[in-house]
Image: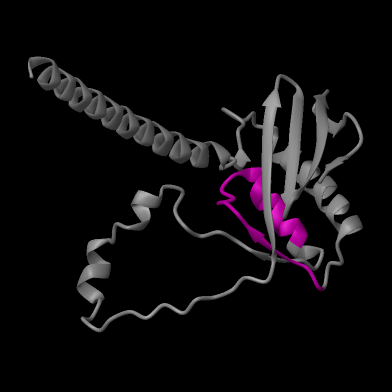
């Protein structure tokens, strides 16, 4: 009888250990899935820390070269680009201006960079809003998803343009106050 009691107690303990292990494994898997989703979001924009005074001039030259390459691949009058991120740097603004002057439609991303800030309303907005419910229309963007990444290493600038699932990349070198391509465009699909 005593052996039976200890055997039942052992089986209950073993079942409890298996349950707690399964719960821990489920939590770990859930956390890994969430982290993999965070790791898959690619950062966009300018990653140039403390740009030099000449960078605004470089931005114009880079934007012209990038727009020329895009014009070779896409028809201007019938192509719309939907920017995936805010273009609040010199290169981004120069590129958007150049694309528009070449005849492309560019839909800028106007959401705040921090999604937490998007949820905060200013006091003026709260006072001026009426109690009627707001109905948002779902708008479908027909443009191509568009983003850019620009970074710098010493005198070498690296520009990547992402259009839908393809990536165009080119390096540029700054010498004697001028910037020029350091290689050909590379296209990755």
Give above or below for 110 relative to 55: below
Say which quarter of the image contains residue 126.
Answer: bottom left
Where residue 10 appears, x then y in whole percent?
19, 20
Within the image, what quadrant is residue 179 found in? Answer: top right
Residue at the extreme left of the image, as rendered: 2
For the N terminus, the quadrant is top left
**Is 94 positioned to the left or the right of 183 in the image?**
left
Residue appearing at x 81%, y 73% in the figure:
78
Residue 168: where, in percent of width, then height?
Answer: 81, 44
> What span is in magenta?
78-99
Residues 115 and 65: in front is: 115
Q: Residue at x 82, y 63 (%)?
A: 102
Magenta-span inclusion, residue 125? no
Colour convention of the picture: one colour
Position above or below: 67 against 32: below
Residue 137 at x, y = what percent?
A: 46, 79
- The percent position of residue 49, horizontal first and vertical second, equals 57, 28
Q: Is residue 49 left or right of residue 31?
A: right
Magenta stretch encompasses residue 81: yes
Tell me the residue at 64%/28% (across/down).
52
Compared across the picture, whether 88 is left or right of 125 comes to: right
Q: From the viewer's perspective, is 149 left or right of 131?
A: right
Q: In this rendered view, identify the residue nearer to me: 3 or 63.
A: 3
The tally of labels here is 0
- Foreground: 109 or 167? 167
Which residue of the protein is positioned furthest toward the front in this rendering?
1
Image quadrant assignment for residue 154: top right
- Give the residue displayed 76% in from the left and 59% down from the top: 99
């Amino acid at each position: 009888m005593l052996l039976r009691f200890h055997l039942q107690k052992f089986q209950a303990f073993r079942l409890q250990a298996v349950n707690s292990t399964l719960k821990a494994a489920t939590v770990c898997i859930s956390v890994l899935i969430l982290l993999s989703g965070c790791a898959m979001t690619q950062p966009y924009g300018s990653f140039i820390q403390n740009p030099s005074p000449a960078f605004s001039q470089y931005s114009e030259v880079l934007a012209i070269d990038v727009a020329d390459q895009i014009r070779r691949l896409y028809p201007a009058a019938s192509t719309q680009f939907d920017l995936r991120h805010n273009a609040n740097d010199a290169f981004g603004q120069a590129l958007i201006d150049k694309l528009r002057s070449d005849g492309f439609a560019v839909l800028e991303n106007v959401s705040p960079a921090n999604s937490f800030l998007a949820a905060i309303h200013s006091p003026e907005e709260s006072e001026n809003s009426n109690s009627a419910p707001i109905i948002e229309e779902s708008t479908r963007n027909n443009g191509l998803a568009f983003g850019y990444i620009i970074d710098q290493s010493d005198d070498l600038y690296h520009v990547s343009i992402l259009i839908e699932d393809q990536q165009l990349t080119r390096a540029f070198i700054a010498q004697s106050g001028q910037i020029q391509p350091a290689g050909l465009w590379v296209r990755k699909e």
